[in-house]
């Protein structure tokens, strides 16, 4: 399929500077954790990625283990790149990560230099690219000295295999240590990838302060709480094929009567402002300028487009924010 990107794509998106770096990221980025594996429909994945790029979403987030099977999301993305997006490579920020289990034995997970180098090499091969734009340590390793993990990330950047580096799932103390170790190696920590949504506010408790002080950006993953903060479950039913129906990462038992009550109350606020629940959830994250980008997932281009509507709506008013706070107090 011959593809030519929408000429107006950069007018549709806003870009935020990532911490105190020179890199800007789109306010909404697309993650390929689910829906882009070898078991998923390639055409649906391609349509979603191209619809994203056409809307100015120029940042795509991967990890070594995304699939299933692990590694296959990188293969899918590499194919979309080769077939459609290669002429635009210089306009695209690709990130990948290593940290979770990828292969057997002591060098197949966590944060050793041995694992990080081998994993990135394999990721580059799967995507058929020479470099990744951002390479992350996917989770802190309690047993490997932080200097080893950060030293490996710094060397990867120096070798040009990644242009920038970041960390994910580090708590505020671990984050401060990692940033300081990286700085010691002469490489800034570009970004932290952390879970954050109206239903999961842990980063407000110290992490955002550390990142702001250090000039590191923040990209928020699972901003829609894996689909809970969308219209998907509002009537209490679990639609076939939805993430909750698969019961692995999102369990139907998480959808309690109290949660449903809150989701519906949030949906009422959304509707009163002419929004959908998903766009309310995204705008709520963007209310804080320390959040560089909202990293959504989507199982179709229709979902993606609904979520992108957040960008054409006005910021949440103080009144809306106040009402949301009241609802979130009850859980
Ligand atoms: P979201 O919270 O955005 O959830 C996405 C899911 O919600 C979709 O796959 C879909 O699920 C549902 N959904 C999205 N939009 C709509 C809509 N408009 N209407 C109805 N349902 C909708 O994010 P993810 O949990 O997918 O995470 C996003 C990205 O963050 C990942 O791809 C990955 O890149 C990154 N991430 C990073 C982690 C880390 O440790 N660093 C961990 C987890 C994620 P469905 O249709 O299947 O029901």
Image (cartoon, grey):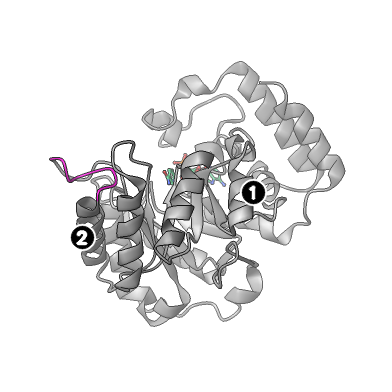
From the image, tell me which residue sits under label 1.
282
- Kindly identify which numbered label has been placed on residue 24: none
From the image, tell me which residue sits under label 2.
122
Q: Residue at x 47, y 59 (%)?
A: 189
| Quarter containing the N terminus | bottom left
- Residue 286, position as x, y percentages in the image: 68, 52
Whether residue 216 is situated above or below residue 236 in the rendered picture: below
Task: Tell me the quarter of the picture where residue 311 sits.
Answer: bottom right
- Residue 180, position as x, y percentages in the image: 47, 54
Q: Residues within 10 Å of mark 1 (few under 14, many from 20)?
A: many
**Res. 98 in view:** yes
Of all residues, the one furthest to the front in this rendering is 184
Task: Tell me the quarter of the picture where residue 116 sits.
Answer: bottom left
Q: Secondary structure at mark 1?
A: helix
Residue in front for this viewpoint, 214 or 313: 214
On whether residue 126 falls in the magenta region, the answer is: no
> Is the C-beta of the residue carrying label 1 under 8 Å from the nearest atom of ligand 1?
no
Q: Is residue 163 left or right of residue 72?
A: right
Whether residue 143 is situated above or below residue 133 in the rendered picture: above
Of all residues, the one furthest to the top in this rendering is 257
Q: Residue at x 20, y 60 (%)?
A: 122
The residue stretch that appears in magenta: 105-112
Q: Residue at x 40, y 32 (%)?
A: 249
């Amino acid at each position: 399929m011959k593809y030519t990107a929408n000429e107006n794509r950069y007018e549709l998106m806003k870009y935020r500077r990532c911490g105190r770096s020179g890199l800007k990221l789109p306010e909404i980025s697309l993650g390929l954790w689910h829906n882009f594996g070898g078991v998923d429909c390639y055409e649906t994945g391609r349509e979603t990625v191209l619809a994203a790029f056409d809307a100015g979403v120029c940042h795509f987030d991967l990890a070594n283990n995304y699939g299933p099977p692990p590694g296959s999301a990188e293969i899918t993305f590499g194919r979309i790149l080769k077939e459609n997006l290669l002429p635009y490579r210089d306009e695209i920020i690709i990130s990948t990560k290593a940290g979770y289990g990828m292969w057997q034995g002591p060098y197949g997970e966590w944060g050793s230099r041995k694992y990080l180098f081998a994993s990135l090499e394999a990721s580059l091969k799967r995507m058929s690219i020479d470099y990744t734009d951002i390479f992350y340590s996917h989770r802190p390793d309690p047993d490997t000295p932080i200097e080893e993990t950060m030293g490996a990330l710094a060397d990867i950047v120096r070798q040009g295999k990644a242009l920038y580096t970041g960390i994910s799932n580090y708590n505020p103390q671990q984050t401060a240590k990692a940033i300081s170790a990286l700085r010691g190696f002469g490489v800034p920590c570009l970004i932290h990838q952390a879970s954050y949504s109206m239903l999961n506010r842990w980063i407000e408790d110290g992490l955002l302060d550390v990142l702001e002080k250090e000039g590191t950006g923040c990209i928020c993953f699972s901003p829609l709480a894996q689909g809970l903060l969308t219209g998907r479950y509002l009537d209490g039913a679990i639609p076939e094929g939805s993430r909750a129906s698969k019961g692995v990462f999102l369990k139907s038992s998480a959808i309690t009567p109290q949660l449903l009550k809150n989701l519906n109350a949030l949906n009422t606020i959304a509707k009163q402002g002419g929004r959908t629940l998903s766009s309310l959830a995204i705008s709520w994250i963007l209310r804080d300028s320390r959040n560089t980008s909202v990293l959504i997932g989507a199982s179709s281009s229709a979902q993606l487009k609904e979520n992108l509507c957040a960008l054409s709506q006005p910021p949440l008013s103080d009144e809306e924010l106040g009402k949301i706070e009241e609802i979130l107090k009850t859980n």
